[in-house]
Amino acid sequence: MNIQTQYNYEKTWTTTNEKDLLRIIEEEIGDADPQGTLLYVKESIKNGKIISVGTCRFKKEKKE
């Protein structure tokens, strides 16, 4: 599953690899559990939801 990210100040969604997803989540939540948060995001976006973590939003990439 490909995950796209978008910060509040951005207008476009960007496909992001897992290493960068963990880095983004770490920046947004600090010392909390970034791996657990990433698992939560992956589970939540499976059905088309958009999840916000701090100033960044995450969604599942739509296949066209």
Image (tube, rainbow, N blue to C red):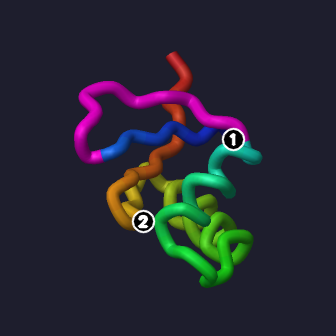
Residue at the far bottom in the pictured view: 32
Instruction: Work out whether residue 52 or residue 2 is closer to the camera in this orientation and state it.
Output: 52
In the image, what residue type sits under mark 2? Answer: Val
Residue 10 included in the magenta stretch of the image: yes
Q: Which residue is painted at 35% across and 44% down in the image?
A: 7
Q: Which residue is mark 1?
A: 1
Q: Which residue is painted at 37% across and 62% down in the image?
A: 52
Q: Quadrant of residue 53?
A: bottom left
Q: Which residue is painted at 37% across and 66% down in the image?
A: 54
Q: Which residue is mark 2?
A: 53
Q: Pointers 1 and 2 in contact (CB under 8 A)? A: no
* Sequence-first disc among 1 and 2: 1
Magenta-tinted stretch: 8-17
Residue at the far top in the pictured view: 64
Relative to 33, say whether 38 is above or below: above
Q: Which residue is painted at 52% across and 65% down in the image?
A: 44
Instruction: Locate residue 31, reporting x and y percent.
Output: 62, 81
Instruction: Locate residue 24, reporting x and y percent.
Output: 56, 53
In terms of secondary structure, where does tag 1 sit?
loop
In terms of secondary structure, where does tag 2 sit?
strand
- Quarter of the image that includes the N terminus: top right
